[in-house]
Amino acid sequence: MPFSLPPNLLRYFDSRIWLSDSGIRKAMQQGLLSGIEESDIQPMTVDLNSSEDVLIYGKVWCQAQTKSLCFGKFDPFFEARSTLRKHGLRVSCPSPYSTSRDFMLINPSMQKFQIPEGGRLAQTYIGGLRSSCASDFSHGVVLRKDEEIRRILKEGYLEIKGLEGQPIIEDGFIKLKPSGLCSISTNPTEVINIFQKRDSVFFKKQTFSPENGSIHIAPYMPANITYRGRLKLSPNVGIQAFYQDEDKTLQLNGVIDPGYHGEIAAQPFVTEETRIDLQHPSLLLRIIFFKDPVQTPYGPERNSTYQGMLWSPSSPDKVEANSG
């Protein structure tokens, strides 16, 4: 399946420590990072914005550029933002080993999209191996052991409410099942500026339950699947999310910032008709733990909005103004 996560990239991510916002700022002050604007610093990532207006026609690949950033001795890890994923767009990010800042935008639908200059295309973690200079700055570590995750839950750094029973913790992931609410694209004919919040025009809600079985997503159909459980992240805990398809293949599915409280969703990219049911966990969460809390967590001080959600399963008639 296109856009699946190569195993070596998961190993690349897991084997490194990742700077928090205060760590990024300190590295900038010491001249070890350059090209980053203060407004682009998120609690544990940096936003990458389009340096030009881009019109994306249907059924095409096109190139979009971001301004040049210098990571010096640090390692980046790029990921597309959910603002694009929920409309079916995909971003082919440069390899962490590449010096290129050219991002390939893929539009598998006939819909036209507009991305304005300054629009947020992707985000990047910044870090390095534990033996690198990254260890001199405030950072988080990826928790890969089930017992580490259980300890974080027990000590209250992370809460998950609204589940049936205990969280599923396996292979270093917290695994969540769909809630029964899915939003499917209405295929509007107008050119869509994806940074204008008009989700109620672009998407139609669909529900499924044990009684009516499952929901089917057509190939290349933009979809937003909400999941059971309401998260409460402390300023010490961030999450990297993955969607797992029926073949157990992982896709990157965004960042959930430290301090976030609320439901979460997945925006899978499917190339063949896919069935989603309530019994199989398909959203996998990898925990990143920061010994020192991030400086500015998700919340009103940042005017934060989680772009991954459309409708909230706890308030299905409310359209969320939705990071990650």
Image: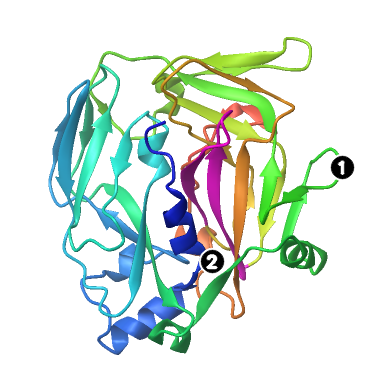
Image quadrant where residue 263 sits: top right
Element carrying mark 1: loop
State whether residue 195 appears in this view. Answer: no
Residue kind at label 2, given as amino acid type = Pro
Magenta-drawn stretch contains 236:
yes
Residue occupied by mark 1:
165
Magenta-drawn stretch contains 229:
no
Q: Position of residue 3 (x, y in %)?
A: 38, 38
Crowding around mark 2 (Cα neighbors within 10 Å: few <14, some 14 to 19, many 20+) is many
- Relative depth, front residue between 254 and 201: 254
Q: Position of residue 200 (x, y in %)?
A: 46, 23
Residue occupied by mark 2:
297
State whether residue 183 appears in this view. Answer: yes
* Left or right side of 182 for 7: left
Q: Which residues are magenta?
A: 235-256
Residue kind at label 1, given as amino acid type = Gly
Please tell me which of labels 2 and 1 falls first in the chain.
Answer: 1
Vertical arrangement, residue 8 with respect to residue 104, above or below: below
Q: Residue at x 19, y 63 (%)?
A: 99
Q: Position of residue 124 (x, y in %)?
A: 36, 60
* Left or right side of 265 for 187: left
Q: Quadrant of the N terminus?
A: top left
